[in-house]
Amino acid sequence: EFQVELFISIDKEYQHNRRENLLIHGIKEQPGESPKRCRELAIEILSKLGVDAIFIDVVHRLGFNPQPGSRVSSRADSNRPIIVRFIGHNSRNVAFQHLTSLPEGVFISDYLTAYRSFLLRKAKECKSKGLVHSVKVYNGDVLISPKNSDDTLILELFEDFLEIIPIELLNESKVFIPATGNVVMDLMMRMRDKRPRFKRKRINGQQPLHLEDSTSIIPSDRPGTITAGAGNDPLVNVRSKKLTTAQVVANGGDTRPQTRSIKSKTNA
C-alpha cells in the first residue's frame, strides 16, 4: 500500500512537469523529416489555434524513429505524434480553446504519463460499453462522469471505477478493472527493463575491459615497496590482472598472477 501511494505521488509530480506540453496527432511524417521541418509543421497547426510562434519552446517527434523499409515504418499508424513544449502554461491552454479550427484528421491531447494513459484507456472502454456518461482529460487529470448524474470524478486509482459502476455491470460488459497495485508493479517492471544498459566499447582498438580485469587500488602494507604495474607511487599496492591463456602456458600451467616487488627509490 505504501508503495502504491508513493508511486501515485511521484506520478502526480511527473504529470505536473508536463503541464506545459501537448501532443499533436495526425500529421503525416515524411521520410527523413528534419527537426526544422517538424517545427514548421507544428507552428502551422498551432497558428490556426491562435498560438503565436514566440511562445513555442521545443518541438520534436515523440517515440522511436523507424528506419526506412522496416516493418514498423510500413505500418499505416507509423506517424509519430509531435510533442510541443510551450514557454508558459497559459499559451498551451489557448490551443485547447480553439479545437474546432483543427484540420480534418488532426487532433491534440495532453501528454499523459503511462499510468494516466492506462486510466484513460479503461475509462474510454467503459464509455464505449455505455457504463459512464462522459470521459475527458483536463490539465492531466482523467475525469469521468457517471450515467444519470452531473457529478464528475477525478480518477486516481483503478478502484475509483467501482465507486460509480456496479461490479455486476462490469462483469456483464466484460470490462476488467485491474487492481492499482498490480498496475503499479507492472509499470515499475517495465521501467526497470527500459533502463539504459552500459555497453562495452572498444577504446583505441583494444578489447573492452571486464570487471575481473580491472585493477584494485588498496593501501600498501609495506610503504616503500610496490607491486608491478602500480606506477611510481610507493604508497599504493595494485593487485595484478588475471593471466591470459598465453601467459598461463608460458608459466607452465601456473594460473597464479606473477608479481614482483620493487624497492622504491625513496628507500634507496
Image: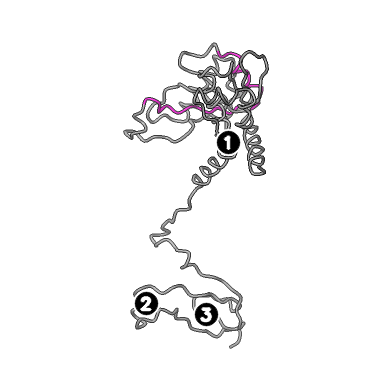
SS for dot 2: helix
Amino acid bearing label 1 = Ala
Q: Quadrant of residue 78?
A: top left
Instruction: Please report the residue visible at 60 percent of the width from the left and 83 percent of the height from the top.
Output: 224
> Furthest residue to the top?
100
Quarter of the image that includes the N terminus: top right
Marks 3 and 1, the one that precedes in the sequence: 1
Q: Quadrant of residue 251?
A: bottom left
Where does the image place residue 17, in percent across and percent down from the top left?
64, 34
Amino acid bearing label 2 = Gln
Instruction: Please report the residue visible at 57 percent of the width from the left and 29 percent of the height from the top.
Output: 119
Marks 2 and 3, the one that precedes in the sequence: 3
Which label sits on residue 107? none
Asked if residue 168 is positioned above or below residue 212 in the image, the reply reads above
Residue at which label 2 appears? 247
Marks 2 and 1, the one that precedes in the sequence: 1
Q: How is the image coloured?
A: one colour
Q: Nearer the viewer, residue 3 or 92?
A: 3
Query: For the magenta stretch, what is the residue range?
Result: 76-99
Q: Quadrant of residue 153?
A: top right
Which label sits on residue 179? 1
Q: Are marks 2 and 3 in contact (CB under 8 Å)?
A: no
Of marks 2 and 1, the one in the foreground: 1
> Furthest residue to the bottom?
268
Cα distance in 3D space between marks 3 and 1:
60 Å
SS for dot 3: strand
Of marks 3 and 1, the one in the foreground: 1
